[in-house]
Amino acid sequence: MPNFPTRTLDPLSLMSRELGRLMRTQRRTATRPAATRRPTAWGVPVNLTETADGYRLRAAVSGVAPEALDISVEGRTVTLRVTRPGVEHSGRRVLGERGIGDVTRRFQLARDVDADAITARYELGVLDVTLPFAAGPRRIEIQQG
């Protein structure tokens, strides 16, 4: 019977193989001159806190115009979309670490918020969003007559 190479499908082998692939990719990228690397993917660092009145979301979005920010709420999900355009440079780029492109962050909240009362403020590269809690269930008084 011929001896064909087989790949094992157990989780540890798969994880080891994937980790090796990632490390090889990282070594190839790290040894490339900085000017030849692609612009890095970027993220939006966020702090989300719960207060007595609602949630407060603060996002670091320096270098982004307020018009390039979009916040939406659907049910208990808050979505933040940020677009950072590329910048044209004259001369040869020596180092390029500033990420460009679109980033979307979604946050699942534990409680309902009042979508009509949400406020957002942008100052010095920080987006500050206040998301007040929705009014809880209340008893409706029934009147006679």
Image (tube, rainbow, N blue to C red):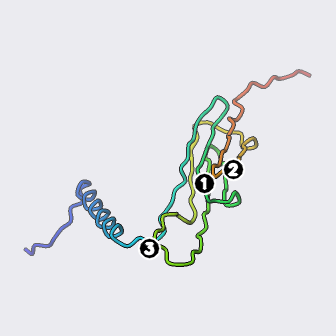
Q: Position of residue 65 (x, y in %)?
A: 68, 60
Q: Decide if residue 73 is on the left or right side of residue 46.
A: right
Q: Position of residue 54 (x, y in %)?
A: 65, 34
Q: Decide if residue 14 is on the left or right side of residue 93.
A: left
Which one is closest to the eye, mark 1 or mark 3?
A: 3
The residue where tag 2 is placed is: 122
* Residue type of the residue flagged with mark 2: Tyr
Q: Decide if residue 20 is on the left or right side of residue 85.
A: left
Pointer 1 or 2: first along the chain: 1
The residue where tag 3 is placed is: 35
* Residue type of the residue flagged with mark 3: Ala
* Helix, strand or loop for disc 3: helix
Q: Are marks 3 and 2 in contact (CB under 8 Å)?
A: no
> Which residue is painted at 71% across and 60% down in the image?
67
Mark sitting on residue 77 = none
Mark sitting on residue 61 = 1
Q: CA distance from mark 1 to mark 2?
A: 9 Å
Pointer 3 or 2: first along the chain: 3
Q: Residues within 10 Å of mark 3 (few under 14, many from 20)?
A: few
> Which residue is painted at 25% across and 58% down in the image?
16
Q: Are marks 1 and 2 in contact (CB under 8 Å)?
A: yes
Which one is in front, 33 or 69? 33
Which one is in front, 53 or 145? 53
* Residue type of the residue flagged with mark 1: Val
Pointer 1 or 3: first along the chain: 3
Instruction: Classify the position of the C terminus by image quarter.
Output: top right
